[in-house]
Every structure is written in C-alpha cells, then in structure tokens.
C-alpha cells in the first residue's frame, strides 16, 4: 500500500492518527486501554475485519468521524456507516449543536 488514506488502509490506524495517539483515543472512548486499541490494529492488519468489537464501533466512529462501515465492513454497508445526529443518544449531542426549543 502506498501512503495516504484510502479504503484499503487500516481504519484503526486512521482513528489513532485522528486522536493524536493510541492513549488519547483510549481516553476519548473511555473504559479501554491503548493496548486494546493497538491489538485491534494488529488484528486488522492480519486480515480480521471483526477486529473492533461491535459494541465499540459507534463510539469509535463518533470520536473520530470515521464511518462505522470502515471499522466493521462485515456489519455495516457504506450507506449505513455514516454517523448522524439521529444515531446519537439523547444527551450525547455535540455542544455546538443547537437544540429545538
């Protein structure tokens, strides 16, 4: 693979880069170690598309802006992979988003 992000690149590496480091990504996700994130990356590199637990995909997508389907192509299609405000639980809205009165 040549440099740059593409559909063949490791999305966990992209997530680590987006957060600044494995420990920073772990802190964003909460309740997980950087070591676990690095294990996901190694498993993805080994060809295991289920490297990221399905229970972590939504938070990982929201923390990084990388669509769900990039982390778990076996569970989500590109059409289902976008993270939208509709997908967020009540109370999880970004601070900058205005709420209806």
Image (cartoon, rainbow, N blue to C red):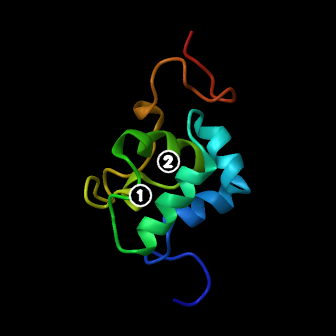
Q: Which residue of the protein is positioned furthest toward the top in this rendering? A: 101
| Residue 34 percent across, percent down from the top left | 62, 50
Quarter of image, res 71:
bottom left
Quarter of image, res 97:
top right
Q: Is residue 1 above or below residue 33?
A: below
Quarter of image, res 26:
top right
Disc 2 target residue: 61
| Residue 6 percent across, percent down from the top left | 50, 77
Q: Nearer the viewer, residue 2 or 85?
A: 2
Identify which residue is drawn at 49% across, 68% down.
Answer: 42
Q: Nearer the viewer, residue 50 or 35?
A: 35
Within 10 Å of disc 1 (Cα), the crowding (few <14, some 14-19, many 20+) is many
Left/right placement of residue 71 relative to residue 97 reads left
Q: Nearer the viewer, residue 48 or 3?
A: 48
C-alpha distance separating marks 2 and 1: 8 Å
Identify which residue is drawn at 50% across, 59% down.
Answer: 39
Disc 1 target residue: 71
Sequence-wise, the earlier of marks 2 and 1 is: 2
Identify which residue is drawn at 55% across, 53% down.
Answer: 37
Looking at the rendered structure, the secondary structure element under dot 1 is helix
Q: Is residue 85 above or below residue 7?
A: above
Identify which residue is drawn at 53% across, 42% down.
Answer: 62
Q: Nearer the viewer, residue 99 or 33?
A: 33
| Residue 69 percent across, percent down from the top left | 36, 57
Residues tagged 2 and 1 counted as in contact (Cβ below 8 A): yes
Left/right placement of residue 18 relative to residue 36 reads right
| Residue 29 percent across, percent down from the top left | 58, 38
Within 10 Å of disc 2 (Cα), the crowding (few <14, some 14-19, many 20+) is some
Looking at the rendered structure, the secondary structure element under dot 2 is helix
Left/right placement of residue 90 relative to residue 5 reads left
Q: Quadrant of the C terminus?
A: top right
């Amino acid at each position: 693979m040549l440099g740059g992000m593409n559909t063949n690149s490791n999305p966990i590496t992209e997530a680590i880069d987006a957060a600044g480091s494995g420990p920073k990504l772990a802190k964003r996700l909460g309740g997980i170690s950087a070591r676990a994130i690095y294990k996901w990356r190694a498993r993805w590199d080994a060809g295991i598309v289920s490297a990221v637990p399905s229970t972590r995909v939504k938070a990982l997508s929201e923390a990084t802006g990388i669509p769900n389907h990039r982390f778990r192509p076996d569970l989500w299609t590109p059409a289902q992979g976008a993270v939208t405000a509709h997908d967020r639980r009540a109370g999880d809205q970004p601070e900058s988003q205005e709420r209806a009165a």
